[in-house]
Amino acid sequence: MQAEHEARLLADRILAHPGLKERVEAIFDIAENTSGELITADQAEERAIEEVHKLGRELLKEWAVQRHEKAIKIVQTTHPTAKKYEKKSSIGNQRSEK
């Protein structure tokens, strides 16, 4: 029963991060050789390293987004009058021809 509960928690966590889910699935595909194209251990190793690098990049991207969102919430609570940064839509004052 405990193992099923832990498996469900893990599945829920993976589903909450679609980018990481995609990378984990790709790693499982390598382990199971679902494509059938990995003939040698060198090929499997090369593909695994590639996918682990992609997993690392995706993980850092998600981490950065979470940190950014957390920082915004902190600023909003500590400085409620602060304005959110937005890019100007105006191109400024146009010079007139003389």
Image (cartoon, grey):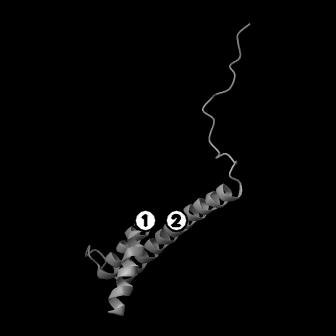
Under circle 1, the secondary element is helix
In the rendered view, would you say 24 is above or below 69?
Answer: below
Under circle 2, the secondary element is helix
Of the numbered discs in the image, which one, if any, rests on residue 38?
none
Residue 75 or 37: which is nearer the viewer? 75
Residue 52 drawn at (x, y percent): 47, 75
81 left or right, relative to 56: right
6 left or right, relative to 92: left
Disc 2 marks which amino acid? Glu
Give the position of the N terminus as an image quadrant.
bottom left
The residue at which mark 1 appears reads as: 19
83 left or right, relative to 1: right
Tell me which numbered mark, 2 or 1, is placed earlier along the sequence.
1
Within 10 Å of disc 1 (Cα), the crowding (few <14, some 14-19, many 20+) is some
47 left or right, relative to 65: left
In the rendered view, would you say 7 is above or below 95?
Answer: below
The residue at which mark 2 appears reads as: 62
Residue 43 drawn at (x, y percent): 37, 77
Within 10 Å of disc 2 (Cα), the crowding (few <14, some 14-19, many 20+) is some
Give the position of the C terminus as an image quadrant.
top right
Disc 1 marks which amino acid? Gly
Please state the total of marks drawn on the protein image: 2
Could you tell me which residue is drawn at 63 percent across and 57 percent down? 72
In the rendered view, would you say 30 is above or below 86?
Answer: below
Could you tell me which residue is drawn at 32 percent across and 76 percent down? 29
Could you tell me which residue is drawn at 62 percent across and 42 percent down? 86
The answer to whether the residues at label 2 and label 1 have Cβ atoms under 8 Å apart is: yes
Q: CA distance from mark 2 to mark 1?
A: 8 Å
Residue 27 drawn at (x, y percent): 38, 76
